[in-house]
Image (cartoon, grey):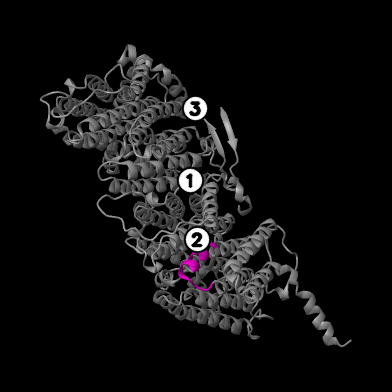
Amino acid sequence: MFLTDIDMGLSIVGISLKMGLNGISMALYLLASVVGLAAGLYAIFSKVENKHWYVSLLLVMQAGLMGVFSSVDIFFFYFFHEFALIPTFIMIGIWGGRERRYAAMEMTIYLTAGAMISLLGIIALYAQSGLNSFDMITLKMYLTAHPLGEIVQNNIFALLLIGFGILVSLFPFHSWAPRGYAAAPASAAMLHAGVLKKFGLYGLVQIAAPLLPLGVAHYGSTILWLALGNVILIGLITMTQTDLKRMLGYSSVMHMGYAFMGVATFSAVGIGGAVMLMFAHGLSVALLFLLADCIGRRTETDEMPSMGGLFGKTPILCGFFVAATMASVGLPGFANFWGEFSLFVSIWHAHPGFAVGAVLGIIISAIYGLRAVARIFYGDQGETVSDKEISDLSLAERLPAIVLFIALIAVGIFPRLISDDVNKAVSATYPQAQVVEIAPASVVNPTHTADHES
Amino acid sequence: MSPDYGTYQTFADANQWLAIWPEISYGVLALLLLALEVIFPKLKHALVPRVALFGQAVLLILLATRIGSVPEVSAFGDILQFSAFGNIMRVFFAACALCTSFVAGIYLKRNQLPRVEFYHILLVVAAAFMLLVQSGHFVMLFVALETVTISLYILVSYSRNSTASLEAGFKYLIQGALSSAILLFGIVLLYGTAGNPLLEGTATDPLAFSDIGHFLALNSHNYVAIIGALMVLAGVCFKIAAVPFHVWVGDVYQGAPTPVTALLAVASKASGFIVLLALVMGPFEPLMYITKPLLSTLAVLTILVGNISGVGQKNVKRVMGMSGIAHAGYLLIGVVAYMSGVDMAIHAIIFYLFVYMLASFGVFSVMAHVSREDDSIMMLEDYGDLLKDNPFLGTVLSIGLGSLAGIPPLAGFIGKLLIFIAAFKAGLYVLLGFAILGVVISISYYFGWIKAAVFRNPEVDPIHSTLYIPSRSMRIFMTVVTLLTVVIGLYQGVVSVLL
């Protein structure tokens, strides 16, 4: 359903502002609003310099995010992404933590390169279709009826894969992420890691894969291998991190690997699962960055070995942190479970070998997650904890955490809240892929799904 | 009546003076300024800049409202060609001159330089630019070009007490004269071959664009003519600072007074591009088999050299110079796309020139405010903490640089987008690859500048350079330029006439 269609003056090249939502974008739109609410709440109660600028940049970012997922015009899809990205750079540069100038510069150059490459891919898609339209729906209808040649599809898909891959930190294009997130102020990290980063995957799911099915088929195994690199290699790197925020940065890189694998299977379960995981991961990683900032401000360090024993002083913070860690590992009851579960089903079905690697990733993430909990909250009180007056989460910090937590639990218990719409949209977007019930059937009998699919 | 009188009558009828009212008005305004100086010697410091600004503003508005009305006349025996396109460029140069006057206002006042002459020459240059881009005859082209160039020699060395300015003027003079000589020699070669009665299609007027085009179509492999055409193009490439004709840029941009640097970077470059377009798609169209690969190569070189020399550059004026070279490279891609038969490329180029003008003048007007006695030695570090010291200047600078870098949602991004789309339609994939590479490299110096101005570096004490607090009129001017950059980036409907 279209909400609007406004000519912005670029109709000469077929660009007009069209906004609307389908099941896939609805889920991410919802994610943007929930994380945005939490990040905003956290920002307005925080004590930053020039808070009015900080909050207004955050709102610009939020506007961009809402625009990304509601754009039907591919140009504006890209445009709003940049709209949200620029404030991120500025916020890191001005309000960031350690190495902020370096991190801001690195992230800007790296992500601009990614954005530029994906822009090339988008323009290539537009130019090759010969339609003079950037409208996603028109393009989809036309290209389904008149598919592009295989080589053209492969080349455009390669451009989009590299461009989007950089933006989502697909291995080996991930190195900007940990440093950038470690330096970013909390609200910016929440919005970027939680929502904005999903732009690339969303682009793959909504634009690249349905319009260029041959390209996906051609590069499917490449994506799988790279994504396995995300899960295993980055997972191992994550385990060695002692810096809390950097560890979270790496872990968010790692979890994106699962979603890429889901897209590479090119099945309705895999793609639906990727969307579910994007939604759930956005919530859990935002919650983790929020809590990491709360911890960092209390202990005045991000080094986990020098913390310890925080549980005695901040039980509520500990509770939230454990919950968020569990959610990100994929414990049943949290939204992440459904995403990861359907992904594993689809990966197992398509490439059993990779499924083994993916499950190994779960173990890795459980190890680093639990070890982080143990280092921060249990054991003897570290030197940064013992000699300080440390209070538990204040109401202003609890509020955004509760918002995210409720969303995680709600979708964890009633995945149908979003999975039905995602399912419908995925099966409409991918008529070629076989449709399988994502969540509800597998609640009852996990093996049933796999059987049914075959 | 004698027959001679009839001939004169025809000539007189052909001279549709009304068709060049904008150029005449600029000339009159320029003379008026000199007259005012003589009539009101005591008031001249207050009066002349105001008259200049006001007159230009009125002319700009008049030109902008009549952008669509093209005179259906052939004037002066077709040495001028009127088109809607020419009208748009008139608005462009009028706007350039107005912006330069604003930037000059603060510069001349601060350095206590005579103002009347500056505005006078500036207005003459503006009129010459307008004639240059509408010329349809090599005589007109050369005369207009020399009017511009000689005026610019004076303007570049205008700051007589500054050695940097004098050095820049000297260097510009030497290299400008060389390029003029090359251009002229090329014209002569064309004249000689096209006027050769032994060759097929010999021209009755071997200097008119249309006649030369006709001649070249029949003799597209005549070596002398080709060499002539290439020499003409080389002279034009000097104007747009395409590699390898860019060597003058660094020193001249650095030494010239800031408003003149702006004029060189924007108006001079734009006029070069329009002339280039008029030539390669006009008389030299039959030579496209040579000019297209040649310009493609130049585009790649220009993008690479411009951007790579920008990295690590610390002097702000040189940064603007190198960035200007890089922008010439992107525009050359547009030219090549247009030569490949993509009609929208011309709109892309015009749009790009306008947004480049807005962004550049935003940056240059900040540069005029942040400065020490000699503004040719301003470094990136001198901009440390600008946002904190003066949020207004910091914002204008960041938005201007962001637009030059092509960061959405600023207008510069739309300009690049249109160029890229045109290039894609023309199938110039290799050029696009280099353009993307160039854009990514350019982020490092544009963002390095923004970083210096906006992100505080606790380890380094900022050098607090003398900040001139912008006056009210400057504030209005800078706000308009910056707002336009943002608004055009978001809503291109406001400039639909360009698209």
Q: Secondary structure at mark 1?
A: loop
> Is the residue A444 above or below the residue A205 in the image?
above
How far apart marks 3 and 2 lie (CA) works out to 39 Å
Asked if residue B46 is among those painted magenta in the image, a careful observer would answer no
Q: Chain of mark 1?
A: B
Q: How many marks?
A: 3
Please tell me which residue is depicted at 61% across the width and 78% down the height of the picture: B143
- The residue identified by callout 3 is A22
- The residue identified by callout 2 is B331
Residue B409, numbered circle: 1
How many C-alpha atoms fall within 10 Å of the one at disc 3: few (<14), some, or many (≥20)?
A: many
Name which residue type carries label 1. Answer: Pro
Q: Chain of mark 3?
A: A
**Quadrant of residue B209 within the rendered picture:** bottom right
Q: Are marks 1 and 2 on the same chain?
A: yes
> Is the residue B480 above or below the residue A134 in the image?
below
How far apart marks 1 and 3 lie (CA) works out to 25 Å
Residue B264 in sight in this render: no
Please tell me which residue is depicted at 44% across the width and 67% down the height of the picture: B298
Name which residue type carries label 2. Answer: Leu
| Between B269 and A304, the one nearer to me in the picture | A304
Frontmost of labels 1 and 2 is: 1
| Label 1 vs 2, first from the N-terminus | 2
Frontmost of labels 3 and 2 is: 2
Q: Could you say where residue B158 lies in the image, as x and y percent from the top left?
A: 48, 75
Which residues make up the magenta segment?
B102-114
In the current view of this chain or complex, which residue is farthest to the top? A444
